[in-house]
Image (spheres, rainbow, N blue to C red):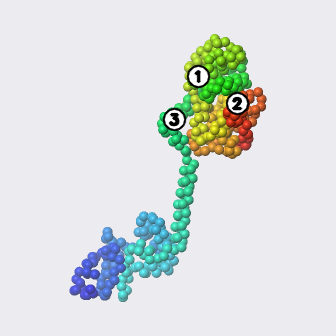
Amino acid sequence: MAGSDENNPGGVVGGAPVPEGLRVGAGKIAVGNGQQRRALSNINSNIIGAPPYPCAVNKRVLSEKNVSSENDLPNDAHRPITRQFAAQMAYKQQLRPEENKKTTQSVSYSSKSEDCAILDVDDDKMADDFPVPMFVQHTEAMLEEIDRMEEVEMEDVAEESVTDIDSCDKDNQLAVVEYIDDLYKFYKKAEASSHIPRNYMDQQHDINERMRGILIDWLIEVHYKFELMEETLYLTVNLIDRFLAVQPVVKKKLQLVGVTAMLLACKYEEVSVPVVEDLILISDRAYSRKEVLEMERLMVNTLHFNMSVPTPYVFMRRFLKAAQSDKKLELLSFFIIELSLVEYEMLKFPPSLLAASAIYTAQCTIAGTKQWSTTCEWHTSYSEEQLLECVRLMVTFHQRAGSGKLTGVHRKYSTSKFGHAARTEPANFLLDFHL
């Protein structure tokens, strides 16, 4: 194949014509005589002196001088950043100046070579000729460790995410899963509009908060003896407070207000309503049937027949579901919140906060440490810090539940029917708990 220009007039190398601009991807071209070396020398000078063709690449070997500025970065800087490419670039940067010089000499074209001329533009092939250095292996191992740690962190985040507490009730039509979130958004708005003034006793001249506590404690026992629904007790207390907040009452009529409020609550919540005579009998015949019916008429007109209000019980059921409660936690939570119904000072807290605080206090009492999950915080919309003031009051009520005159709640929850919840030791550490 070697010959003069007369035998190869078109500059054919290996049987194929060679254009003026050297075709990229030609790899290593071996030259057999001086005339061909001279022709390649001319081509080399043309490539260096003239603008490159679209298909030609003028490649420079990476060295400290070449990477001194962003403008002098090699074409590799415009390649996609992959782990393999990053390892190759790191290896090039770590080469010693002597090795850079040696590498430059080995891959550059020399027109003065007597044997052959080499033009290598395949960087990937050049990098594959060198073994992967130890620091690159360490870098790859470190990157893999970071990826593994990120996966573990993502698993931890997933474990702390909010639990779908309604997934088990999707086939239960009575659970109204499609509307439950909207319902509780409405309850939150309604509790703000129907909030009871915390100092309404200032407007009463013949009764005080202590008398109110005695009345509520007695009604809790009546509710227990009549075996009424739980909703009835909370609505009864709500009706009493709302009525006393706008209507002055004398002392001798206060028990009549309580009995009538329970009658209205039974008519709203119960399937089987106690007759008026039973309520008169339980109040030791202090009032007549006529007085009860007159007070009933006055009360519903004063309250504008509005019986649909969110009580703490409404929120208790939802929040207990969020806490994934068992029977023990449920009974202890209701014991704590019924202790709070008796206390007048607890009117300053909205019903939803009372419910959340009672469940939080019960969880901490059973576990012996603070317990408030992300799911509970999401569904109650209260953080631990927001509950702390109410929780401390509930712990003090728990401490003195069996002492004093108002022991109706303690006696009720000391029975086996309510799991002896009143015998549980209070969470005293919450009194000193600081966030």
Disc 1, SS? loop
- Disc 1 designates what residue? 272
Label 3's element?
Answer: helix
The dot on residue 175 is 3
10 vs 212, nearest the viewer: 212
- The residues bearing labels 2 and 1 have C-alpha atoms spaced at a distance of 22 Å
Q: Is residue 248 visible?
A: no
Q: Earlier in the sequence, mark 2 or mark 1?
A: 1
Tell whether 154 sits left or right of 432.
left
Residue 250 % position (x, y): 70, 16
Query: How would you rate the neighbour count of disc 2 (Cα within 10 Å): few for under 14, some for 14-19, many for 20 or more?
Result: some
| Residue 304, image x, y percentages | 56, 19
Disc 3 from disc 1: Cα separation: 24 Å
Q: Residue at x 71, y 16 (%)?
A: 284
| Dot in front, 3 or 1 | 1
**Rendered-image quadrant of the N terminus:** bottom left
Query: Which circle's residue, 3 or 1, is located before the other in the chain?
Result: 3
At 56% from the left and 55% from the top, the residue drawn is 153
> Is mark 2 in CB contact (under 8 Å) with mark 1?
no
Asked whether, in this view, residue 286 is left or right of residue 320, the answer is: right
Q: Residue at x 54, y 60 (%)?
A: 148
Give the crowd class for mark 1: few <14, some 14-19, many >=20 residues within 10 Å.
few
Q: Residue at x 68, y 36 (%)?
A: 419
Disc 1 marks a residue whose amino acid type is: Ser
Disc 2 to disc 3, how far (Cα)?
30 Å
The residue closer to the viewer here, 105 or 193, is 193
Numbered circle sitting on residue 284: none
Residue topped by disc 2: 412
Direction right: furthest residue: 404
From the viewer's perspective, tell me whether residue 144 is left or right of residue 239.
Answer: left
Mark yes or no: residue 126 visible: yes
Q: Position of residue 339 (x, y in %)?
A: 69, 31
